[in-house]
Structures are given as C-alpha cells and as structure tokens.
Image (cartoon, helix red, strand yellow):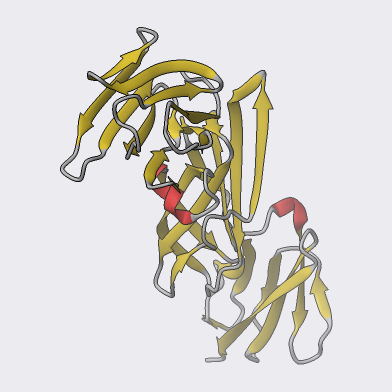
Amino acid sequence: MSVLGDDIKCNHVEEETAAQLHVVWSPNQPSRAKLMILLNETEVALCYLEPVKCTPFSKLTKATIKSTPNQSYEINVSVLGVKSLGYWKVRYINEADVKNDTVCKFIMFARAKDLKCQSLSREEIHIYCFSKRIYPSAACILNYIDNKENYVSEEGRQLHSKDTFRNDTHLLTSTCTFVKPASIATTDKFTALVTMFPNISGSQADIMYGTSVSVLVTLSKPFIKFENCPEEVDLGAAINCLCIGEGIEPVNAMFRWYNTFTNVVITNTSRLTFVATQHSREFSCVVDDVLHKRNLSLTYVLHVNSK
C-alpha cells in the first residue's frame, strides 16, 4: 500500500519464519522525523535520521535503514516468534504534515505436513488425501493425464473438503476428496498429482506454498467373462461353463443362465452344466449387481460337431 508517497509492504508469514515489513519513507522534515514500528500494538523498533539509524527493542527484532538516491529511506524490519495472524503499524513522529498511522495486515500460514493420498477408485476417479497440519485452511488441486484427457480440477478448489481445528489455530488437520466420473471401457491406469496448499489469499497463486503427492489410479468397470466354456465340442461332450462377474463383489452378485432362443431360465447359479446335443446352442449369462442396481449380460455360443 502507498500513503503520502511512502511505500509500505508486508508479506504473509510462514510458520517458524520472521514477520517482515518493508517501508520506503519520504520524510517531509528529515531533521526531526521519526518512525515508530509496532507489531500487534507492541513497539518493536524506532527509526530516525539524525543519525540515520533504527533501534530494535528486543533480541527477536532486526531493523535497518539506508538512504536511497531519490532522497528517501528504505527501512526493513523483521521479528521472529510471531505465532498468529496480525498487523504492522507505522507511526509517524514529528512530521511537518500530519500523517495517519499506517497499517499493513498479514496472515500466518503453514504448509501441508505429512500429506498422504490414496486412490479409492473403481469405476470413477476417487482420491482421498489427508494432512496432519495446515493453516489457515486447505485448498487442493488434482492434475492428471490419461489416454483420454488432460485434467486439472477447478482452480484452488477440491470437490469435497474438511478442515478440523485441534486445540488451537495452528493444529489444523485437513482432508480433500476428489470424485469424478471416468470414461473407460473396462480398465485404465494412470498417475495423478494432488497438490494441497494453504488457502491464504483465495487464489491459485498460493500453490507456490503447496505440497504434492503422486497417486496411482487404477480404474475398472465390471464385466462378464467365461471360464472353461469351449466354443466348439463334439456331440455328447459334457459342458461345465462358469460365468464370472469381474469387479462385482460376490455378495452383491446374482446369476442366471437362460436359453437365448426360448428365453427360458436354465439355472440361477453361475455355473452352466449340460451335455452337448446334436444342435449348436446359444446361452446368455446375466449378472445382477444388487448394490448398484444394474445388470450385465454376455452370450455364450456353442458349436456342436455332429460327426
């Protein structure tokens, strides 16, 4: 921010680092002018021009002043041990023209600690991430490239998130969950990158403080396959064909075989057993997925050699 020709800036503060203030000061009465620097209403340093000097008021404070070619003065103040968000205040003393106190606010932040992600994906992309500590809140971005698309989630936002405070504002756990439909035929595999970062300004620029984790995503849609089901046999051969619902939990699967031509159900089990007659035959296996309320089907065609 700028006030009466003075440039006053402060950055957001990462935990365990110093809070910093930068002032370019153009005093209108150099012989008597002074600047008092306050941090959260506590005086931390006094800067003046005769002699050109800054005096810090504690061992945790550093303060310097130097002149610039355009007859102004550059002041830098840093303070260690800041434990929360706050503000700097610049107080003008003995200026010829009255200048109001100038305030520069900052936010304390912590990067994601011990970030872990896992893929819970099956038919859709489902990634869950957890951080033991981040502050003031978390934002996440999902980025991946598979054989169909290059995807980046909405800027600075996760589809589902939860922040939980523990004890005080610096013990904030956070989760982010991405759930996204996937367009696949049966299976797909790719590596996704999740970045969690402190949501300081509400923009994606905060990603510069992000922590990233790679996650292997394996997608698979349920399908039917046959086991021990020959396509061609001799007359009188015993058939013992097994219908398998891949990707469906056995407890949720209900099977039935029926004759494709007559539409008559032959058995309500996954196994079809019979003796090959002189005619080629066609059967369909249907698997009902009770949990997802859908069914899959696949046709089994048997050719019988009569000779």
In this rendering, is residue 279 above or below 240?
below
Q: Is residue 26 left or right of residue 221?
A: left
Q: Residue furthest left?
A: 69
Kindly indicate the quadrant of the structure image that contains residue 210: top left
Residue 2 vs residue 193, the one in the foreground: 2
Q: Of 87 and 109, which appears nearest the observer?
A: 87
Horizontal arrangement in the rendering, residue 306 relative to residue 144 (left or right): right
The spot of residue 78 in percent (x, y) is 35, 23
Identified at 41% across, 21% down, the residue is 16
Q: Is residue 117 above or below residue 49?
A: below
| Horizontal side of residue 81 vs 138, given as left or right | left
Q: Can the viewer see residue 75 in this picture?
A: yes
* Residue under the point 67% across and 28% down: 165
As drawn, which residue projects farthest toward the top? 59
Indicate the position of residue 104 as horizontal and vertical percent values.
Answer: 49, 37
Give the residue displayed 35% in from the left and 7% down from the top.
Answer: 59
| Residue 150 picture location, percent across and down | 41, 70
- Camera-side residue: 259 or 254? 254
The structure residue drawn at horizontal position 32% and vertical position 39%, both measured from the top left corner, is 24
User: Depth check: 81 or 203 in front?
Assistant: 81
